[in-house]
Amino acid sequence: MNTDYDRSRTERVLSLALDLGKSMIKCGAEINRVEETVTRIGYAYGMKSTEVFSVVSMITATVADEGGRTHTQTRRIYSYSINFDKLEQLNALSRKICAEKPDTEEARAELEKIMVPSRLFNPIVLLGYMLASAGFAVFFGGTLMDGIATMPVSVMIYFFNSFVKVTGASRLFFTALTSALSGAMAIFFVYIGFGTNADMIMIGNIMLLIPGLMMTNSVREMLCGDLMSGILRLLESVILALSIAVGFAIPIYISGLLGV
Amino acid sequence: MDLNEIFTLLISGVIGTVGFSILFKSNKSRVFCCAVGGLLVTAVYLWCVSITDNLFFQNFLPSLFATVYAEIMARVMKAPTTPILACSIIALIPGGRLYNTTYHFVAGNMEAFDSELISMLQVAAGICVGITCVSVIVNEINRHKFKQIFDKD
């Protein structure tokens, strides 16, 4: 019976590289960045070859060490949310790993320190939601009052987004639901005289929901050669855009019927 | 467009950009950099709107500009490009057109729906091609560097 539980170095390196890659995808990194990072870490620890393939929902890599043994591992990514601060720290960590080649456990401890889940309620982020929606409501032609009227709606969007992030509920369904509620709130606000253009209030809030970053990233990935991942991301963003459209269509349609 | 209107657009564009850079949880030291990016991109966009009616070029040039700005600032601030780019470019995202497309679809104005949908795609294509033009070149340079590092070993 094998009592040697100490995993081989190759396995630990591969495991570290993939966990770092997974964390990067979870924070919203581009796929070629992730593949490059995993490859670089493999090379840094002296692997003879590192073959990586990644899409937005999975990374798989095979490394061959000096002794000719090969190891393969896979990571599955279920959800991601953009967090540029963590992404930057992860980039710094991967650079550090490549430069200093620390012990894998040491590097892993640092990775875990970065990936500590952020606070559930973050008033600064909420402020970001409010500024973004208000700014763009005015940008697209609304009045100042329209901008202010987007703020309560964006608070609602923030709480729904946090809910989806925490519970892992269906993003598609909740995007549609959030859109429908924001549309209804915008129309209601204008009805009671808080803001003047319901469409501008809705546009401000659409900017929060629209997967614009995802869409631009997807096309960029496709044109840079990561076809698979680009197609998956594009499809996801188109479906999300459709669910936003469906969500907003409902209150617009009903308000049209009621003649509000 | 009078001066007042331009001023409103610039200010609201910057506020929106700052909002998004907070929402994407950018590092605090990057928020200012993103705000400047948002201001410049909005300015370039307004300039493009004044010189051409072509939706593709109205968005292609600002997005080209944003990518160059982000690549430069990333080198200067020793930060990754994506966070700066994603925030600076956000003002170009066609949120208003998505709304109009939906609105015309619901209202049954199929001709208006078609033209809005096509213009939304034109805008999206402009943004993407603008980013890609620059990032393909940068990628090639990076790959060249990457090769050099490992050829030396």
Image: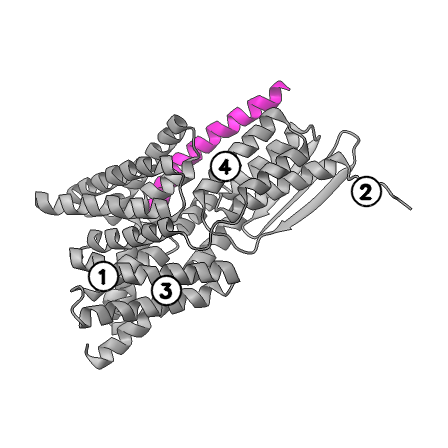
Q: What residue type is labelled 2?
A: Tyr
Same chain for the residues at labels 1 and 4, yes or no? yes
Closer to the camera: disc 3 or disc 4? Answer: 4
Q: What residue type is labelled 4?
A: Gln
- Main SS type for the magenta part? helix
How far is disc 3 from disc 1 in space, using C-alphas?
20 Å
Residue B117 on image: x %, y % = 30, 60
**For numbered disc 1, what is the local secondary structure?**
helix
Residue A244, which numbered label? 3
Q: Is residue A53 something that shows in the picture? A: yes
Q: Which amino acid does label 3 sit on?
A: Ile
Residue placed most toward the observer, A172 or B65: A172
Task: Say which residue appears at 52% left-offset and 38% top-offset.
Answer: A90
Residue A89, which numbered label? 4
Q: Earlier in the sequence, mark 1 or mark 4?
A: 4
Residue occupying the far top of the picture:
B152
Colouring style: one colour
Residue B116 on image: x %, y % = 26, 60
Do the CB atoms of the residues marked 1 and 4 lie less than 8 Å apart?
no
Residue A85 on image: x %, y % = 45, 41
Residue bearing mark 1 = A149
Residue bearing mark 2 = A5
Do the CB atoms of the residues marked 3 and 4 lie less than 8 Å apart?
no
Closer to the camera: disc 3 or disc 2? Answer: 2
Please give the range of residues in magenta. B127-153
Identify the chain of the residue marked 4, using the numbered disc in the image.
A
How far is disc 3 from disc 2 in space, using C-alphas?
51 Å
